[in-house]
Amino acid sequence: MRRWLATVSISIVSALSLVACGGGGGGQASQSPAASGGGGEKKQVEVFSWWTGPGEADGLQAMKKIFEQQNPNYTFFDAAVAGGSGDKAKALLQSKLQANTPPDTFQGHAGAELQGYIKAGNLEDLTFLYDELKLKDVFPAQLVEQISVDGKIYSVPVNIHRSNVLWFNPAVLKDAGVAAAPKTIDEFIADLEKVKAKGKIPLSIGSEWTVTHLLENVLLGSMGTDAYNALFKPGADWNSPQVTKALESFAKIMSYAGDPQDDWQPAAKQVADGEAAFNIMGDWAYGYFHNPPEGGLGKKSKTDFDWAPAPGTEGTYMWLSDSFTLPKGAKNRDGAIAWLKVAASKEGQDAFNPKKGSIPARKDADQALYTDYLADALKDWSSNKLAGSIQHGVSVNQPWLAAITESVGLFIGSKDVKALQQGLADAAKSNAQ
């Protein structure tokens, strides 16, 4: 918290606030010299995210460079909070919002998570920015819908991530007699057993949130897209035999997991280093595997690591999208809008996403920049069925996710499938939107 209290805050000149409130985003560039305070002092723009690890931090820095080049009167203040998936960051953010001391802009997942902030009245309407920049023409309609309430749009998506990716080490699989990535849950369990027999870690796992991430993938792979998506509708039956079967498979798969690592990166590294065979993680892992050693592991795709849809999920893109917001009461509203313009831009997204391991939210990105895994992702995003992530904010809001996380945490200790299912059913009953 001290880090936040130390953040330098300089008030916006009231006249500039009035210009911005009028919806005239086009006046931002011409007004920015006044925003520096007259003495040449640069104003900080506090950008809150949870991108601190290799790959993700590199993508953020690439966007920061563009922002500071285009806005010489602003400096980027990186208010990132460590912890994959943002659980720690979101807890801190909630305390900031409740205290009416929001950052200038913060990262939020499109879908139910973001809509929680909207319905709580934390965010300004960004429809004016969409109109000015003609963003409805370049973002997919179904994505804009996920960041809107009552026809008003509340964030700028910077990417599309895929949650349902099976990462694996080809050499470890070959040594275990596994010829190809498993396509079904049953094949996956059989392959885990083969790897175990060879003395390697069958499945690497990270901190608790990565277990919830695994759970959403097993639910999708076991139940199928339509049944999975139906779980988040009012009146859904989380006590159904289909859910029971999926949870029994989840428990079996978890029995092959290695010792839990501190977060997703060390778990992914076990695969890249040949210590483990499989890891189910979002495609942000690609940036970590692939990027040069100063920002990643510098590993060679198809040799040191490979990928496939998570077992049972081929033809479905379990998606999530990172976006940036304009909180009500932001100290540097003009600077936040300047940041949002970079985040929305083709240049910003094409600088950010290849390093982050994601594909752009914009439909007009330079496809030549997206090669290897990212080329596969672009193709699948345009053709696959869609399913929303649980852990990453699309399908459930924050209270619902907290209840799911609690049930998963209890399961890690007890291994009690029946109790897990009841906990998930109770969470749905209490929190269904």
Image (spheres, grey):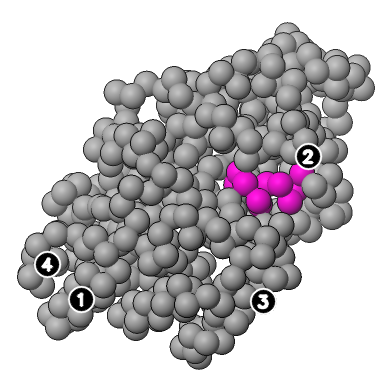
Residue at the extreme top of the image, as rendered: 30
Distance of mark 3 from mark 4, alpha carbons?
Answer: 39 Å
The amino acid type of the residue labelled 3 equals: Asp
Query: Can I make out residue 102 in this image?
Result: no
Of badges 3 and 4, nearer the viewer stands 3
Quarter of the picture containing the C terminus is bottom right
Mark carried by residue 190: 1
Q: Quadrant of residue 231?
A: bottom right
Front residue of 339/359: it is 359
Residue contact at pointers 3 and 4, CB within 8 angstroms = no
Of badges 2 and 3, nearer the viewer stands 3
Q: Is residue 322 above or below residue 186?
A: above
Of badges 2 and 4, nearer the viewer stands 4
The amino acid type of the residue labelled 2 equals: Leu
Query: How many numbered dots are placed on residues in this image?
Result: 4
Which contiguous range is marked in magenta?
109-118
Check disc 2 and report the residue beneath it. 123
Q: In terms of secondary structure, what is the magenta stretch mainly?
A: helix
Distance of mark 2 from mark 4, alpha carbons?
Answer: 50 Å
Front residue of 144/270: it is 144
